[in-house]
Amino acid sequence: MTEILRNGTGLAQSSIIAAGVRDEILSGTRRPGERIGQQALAEQYGTSRLPVREALRMLESEGLVTVVSNAGARVSKLELDECVEIYRIREQLDPLLVSLAVPNYTDEDIARLTELERAVAMASNVEEFLSADRTFHVESYRAARSPILFETVERMWNTTQHYRRAYSHLVGDDGLGLNHLEHQLMLAAFRDRDASEARRLLYSHIRRTRRAFTRHPEIFQEA
Amino acid sequence: MTEILRNGTGLAQSSIIAAGVRDEILSGTRRPGERIGQQALAEQYGTSRLPVREALRMLESEGLVTVVSNAGARVSKLELDECVEIYRIREQLDPLLVSLAVPNYTDEDIARLTELERAVAMASNVEEFLSADRTFHVESYRAARSPILFETVERMWNTTQHYRRAYSHLVGDDGLGLNHLEHQLMLAAFRDRDASEARRLLYSHIRRTRRAFTRHPEIFQEA
DNA sequence: AGTTTGTGAATTGGATCCAATGTAACGAGA
DNA sequence: TCTCGTTACATTGGATCCAATTCACAAACT
């Protein structure tokens, strides 16, 4: 009965550690190729190395970490080809997800999404933009109530996060204008409850980003 | 230098165990909802429970196993809604994958795929059919050389394997005729190197299966 | 007779300890 | 001075041991 921070329903320490490392990778604290020591992680979270190892296996299955036997774990790196492949997947799945969500939108949903898009447009630095952009899209997917599809999309989003950041830093504010226009068109389709139009717009949105990556292969160069 | 069965490049015991359990789940030896004891697995593979736990975490991330804290691991069950969701994903990804493969087909590839389809048509029982059908599709994807997309598709395939088996047992030979016709049309598109036609045909192929599931919700009833 | 509660065993989660592999620094030789 | 080989160290992989939680069975109570 002591109000000790209980692990909730089945939240083992390995899950907590995995979530922490995941956040650190997504936030850019840990960069691709960087080594992840078990001992260091164990000390950081005040546990033994055992839950750490399970956490690393979980992250490996998510594609965020690459484990080599007897050589340790590293943050996964992506080649341009692989990033393009993932974006091809997203070109298919994100539009499907949004097309499932649009019919379920309430007026409140659309008002909230409009506000979230304002936050994207008003972002004053790269980190703010990345965070707001992700929130906008994630929230636009919520009404689909398709947890498996959502998780699959989120996984694709996560593994490419670092390169989206690198691209944003590279181009600065250029291209944000197009991004804003596409978001506005999507919001219009949302208001019309036009699922197929929202689907096409999101497809183009992601496709354009994919082609932008192809124009900037230097992002994927070895450090 | 001793030719001891080396673990190859990074094949830890946890990966071996995970592969074994994965096979047992896919082959139907372990049924959805069935408990997976750590101790039993450890004895089966002659190791301690430690690699077993890592293996279960990996399978959990793949969606094949559901782990509840302090309550053990079980083979994942799927509701009809979830299975439909996964098939909606496959409707998008499998066609993309085949459309990437078709342009790369050699004449030998097409000859081999024709043979593999004959094996599907000649399958004399459910297990043979499932195995041959999977081989045909997997081989048709190989030329795409898109490992990430392939792995994603394979994951979707794996989590729904049990229900495909249940459906096949339920309907027997009915519907196999349509399956064969669709495969023949796909082969024709392959020979023409008509990627967009192959894509549409595979979309219809998977969509039809999804709708068949919806007509047989009894497959997903509690045992 | 059905429900509930308590006690027991079985199973899971975690920590410490030991072996094996990979890495790196150091030294010797060309 | 550069290269190669050897040795020492750090890190990972695995096994055994201990604590905590859950589940099952049985007994008692309503």
Image (cartoon, coloured by chain):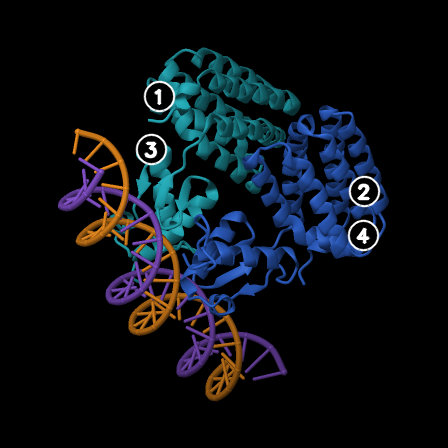
Chain colours: A cyan, B blue, C purple, D orange
Please state if D12 lies on the left or on the right of B193 as rendered: left
With respect to residue B12, does A90 lie above or below? above
Residue A77 visible somewhere in the drawing:
yes
Q: Is residue B63 left or right of residue A63?
A: right
- Of residues B125 and A121, which is closer to you in this image? B125
Q: Mark 2 is on which residue type?
A: Asn
Q: CA distance from mark 4 to mark 3?
A: 50 Å
Residue pictured at 59% horizontal, 38% vertical: B150
- Around disc 1, counting alpha carbons within 10 Å, would you say few (fewer than 14), some (14 to 19), or many (20 or more)? some
Considering the numbered disc 1 on the image, is that residue within a helix, a strand or a loop?
helix
Q: Amino acid at mark 4?
A: Ala
Disc 3 target residue:
A31
Q: What separation in Å lies between label 2 and label 3 (alpha carbons)?
A: 47 Å
Q: Amino acid at mark 1?
A: Val
Q: Disc 2 marks which residue?
A: B179
Of callouts 1 and 3, the N-terminal one: 3
Query: x and y percent of residue A222 in the render?
Result: 36, 27
* Camera-side mark, 4 or 3: 4
